[in-house]
Amino acid sequence: MAPLGYIEILDGKGNVIERNAVESFPLNIGRAYTNQVIVSDPYVCPMHLTIAPDPQGHLIARDLDSVNGLRNGAEGARVKELEIHSGSQFRIGHTLLRYCSIDHPFAPTAVEGIGKVSPLVSPYAAVGAGVGVLVLLCLESFLSSVERVKAINIISEPLPIIATMLGWAGLWSLASRIIVSRFYFAPHVTIAAAALVATSLFGVMSEWLEFFFPAIPMLWLAGLVGYGLVLAGLVYGHLGFASFLRTRSRLWAALAVSIAVVGMNTISYFAARSKFSTVMEYTGVLKPIDAALLPAISADLFIDASQKLKRDLDRLAQKAKAAQP
């Protein structure tokens, strides 16, 4: 007997995890083994839901007085009954379901190598991001040095940071392999590299702002707000390739991690501050301002002005000497 349709179990991103053929109605869904569709979800009751046609032939999903109820869609309101059509989604407990009839339209077959692919997935993006981070760290090391250094020293200094970045991406790749069955090493490297670049730019910008506006603790504000946003973006990006969480859930998880880390660092900062110290605290390396940004005159004009000033002083000195009795 051909099935009448299918009940699909979806993950947080709407991908199909499991399909169950509908052989007849009424169709019972729950955790008990007597159901036609068995759901392994602790928030689903043993006999949670039944689907059956009404006298007019419309399919109706009815909640069987369950604890957590029936909801229309992933985030819809709780309802007692719900009319479903082919493609309708409904949630019981923490499980998202979809009913599809046998004539439900489907997407055309994807051509291998063609399609919408995130640029983060490309290994070329990861290589480019890694090289960009290396160049940026080398430049930062060169500009912060006040001594003559060799090129090999400039290149070798950022290598521990690059190794840490690759190790961090490798841990997230392992999590991706366990959770979503794919490594996604290149996207994780690109995301980590972008976070490093953003952190470096925030640091440089905050140092310059604190240099121009010393009354404002820009470095502390950058650490509280800027680095918190970078951390949230880092976690959000990694979770996009290492979990089945929906966008809103990923956003809340990233914000929670960022707030927790920034909060602990802030508490540690204030706890470690001394009440009084005779030692000046410098937050960064003072860098000279480019001459083009300063109001200046040429050396010739400066010499002419100095000679004019000398003549004026000599004239005043002569007048003072002549006025003496």
Image: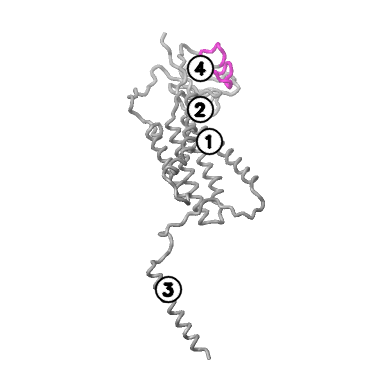
Mark-to-mark CA distance, 3 and 1: 62 Å
The disc labelled 1 sits on which kind of residue? Answer: Ala
The disc labelled 3 sits on which kind of residue? Answer: Ser
3 or 2: tag closer to the N-terminus: 2
Mark-to-mark CA distance, 3 and 2: 79 Å
Along the horizontal axis of the image, is 123 left or right of 180? left
- Res. 23 visible in picture: yes
Residue 150 % position (x, y): 43, 46
Q: Give the range drawn in magenta.
A: 31-53
Mark-to-mark CA distance, 4 and 1: 38 Å
The disc labelled 2 sits on which kind of residue? Answer: Ala
Which label sits in the foreground, 3 or 2?
Answer: 3
4 or 2: tag closer to the N-terminus: 4
Q: How crowded is mark 4: few (under 14 residues within 10 Å), some or many (20 or more)?
A: many
Secondary structure of the residue carrying tag 2 is loop
Kindly identify which numbered label has been placed on residue 306: 3
Q: Main secondary structure of the magenta part?
A: loop
**Quadrant of the rendering where the N terminus is positioned:** top left
> Would you place residue 185 above or below residue 99 in this image?
below
- Residue closest to the eye, 43 or 182: 182
- Residue closest to the eye, 256 or 186: 186
Q: How crowded is mark 2: few (under 14 residues within 10 Å), some or many (20 or more)?
A: some
Which label sits in the foreground, 3 or 1?
Answer: 3
- Residue closest to the eye, 301 or 44: 301
What residue would you read off at disc 4? 51
